[in-house]
C-alpha cells in the first residue's frame, strides 16, 4: 500500500513541481484536452504538518491560479477522499482563491467502504 507524502523525504516544493508535471502530462491526451480531467486525491494519513506546508497563503494562491488559469488543461472534477480535520481547516485558505465554477466541481467523500457508490457514475465511465 502506498504511503502518504512525507515532507522530510520530498519537500513541498518538489511535490508541487511533480504535481504540475503530472497535470501537464494530461494535456498530451486529446480526450483530456477536450473533455477535461477528474482529479482524485486520497488524503489518508494527512498530518497537520503536511497541511501547514501547503497552506501558506502565497503557495495556496499560486496553486489555485495555476490550476484554474495558467494550465490549458481543464479540471472537470476535484475529489478529496478521506480528508482530515486539519485538511478541512487548511482548505479554507485555498477556497478563498477558488472560482465559483471550480468550487462547484469540488467534492468531498468521507471515509467510507462504499466509495465506489458515492462517486457519480458519469465519472466512472470506464467501468
Image (cartoon, rainbow, N blue to C red):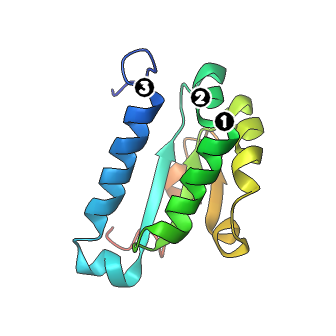
Secondary structure under tag 1 reads loop
Tell which circle, 1 or 3, labels the residue nearer the N-terminal end.
Answer: 3
Residue 84 drawn above or below residue 75:
above
Counting other residues with Cα less than 10 Å from the Cα at mark 1, is it few (<14), some (14-19), or many (20 or more)?
few
Q: Which mark is residue 11?
A: 3
Secondary structure under tag 3 reads loop
> Camera-side residue: 116 or 72?
72
Q: Separation of disc 2 and disc 1 at Cα?
A: 6 Å
Q: Position of residue 60 (x, y in %)?
A: 63, 46
Q: Which mark is residue 42?
A: none
Residue drawn at x 66%, y 22% as measured from the top left = 48
Residue drawn at x 69%, y 66% as measured from the top left = 103
Which quarter of the rendering shows the N terminus?
Answer: top left
Q: Are marks 2 and 3 in contact (CB under 8 Å)?
A: no
Q: Separation of disc 2 and disc 3 at Cα?
A: 9 Å
Tell which circle, 2 or 3, labels the residue nearer the N-terminal end.
Answer: 3
Residue 28 drawn above or below residue 58:
below
The number of discs equals 3
In the image, is 45 to the left or to the right of 74?
right
Q: Position of residue 115 (x, y in %)?
A: 53, 50
In the image, is 59 to the left or to the right of 23?
right
Secondary structure under tag 2 reads helix
The residue wearing badge 1 is: 56
Counting other residues with Cα less than 10 Å from the Cα at mark 2, is it few (<14), some (14-19), or many (20 or more)?
some
* Corner quadrant of residue 78: bottom right
The residue wearing badge 2 is: 53
Amino acid at each position: 500500500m502506498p504511503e502518504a507524502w512525507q515532507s522530510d523525504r520530498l519537500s513541498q516544493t518538489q511535490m508541487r513541481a511533480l504535481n504540475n508535471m503530472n497535470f501537464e502530462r494530461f494535456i498530451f491526451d486529446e480526450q483530456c484536452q477536450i473533455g477535461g480531467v477528474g482529479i482524485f486525491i486520497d488524503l489518508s494519513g494527512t498530518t497537520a504538518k503536511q497541511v501547514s506546508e501547503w497552506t501558506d497563503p502565497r503557495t495556496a494562491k499560486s496553486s489555485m491560479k495555476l490550476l484554474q488559469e495558467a494550465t490549458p488543461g481543464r479540471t472537470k472534477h476535484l475529489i478529496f477522499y478521506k480528508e482530515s480535520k486539519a485538511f478541512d481547516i487548511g482548505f479554507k485558505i485555498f477556497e478563498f482563491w477558488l472560482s465559483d465554477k471550480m468550487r462547484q466541481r469540488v467534492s468531498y467523500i468521507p471515509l467510507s467502504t462504499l466509495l465506489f457508490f458515492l462517486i457519480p457514475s458519469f465519472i466512472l465511465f470506464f467501468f
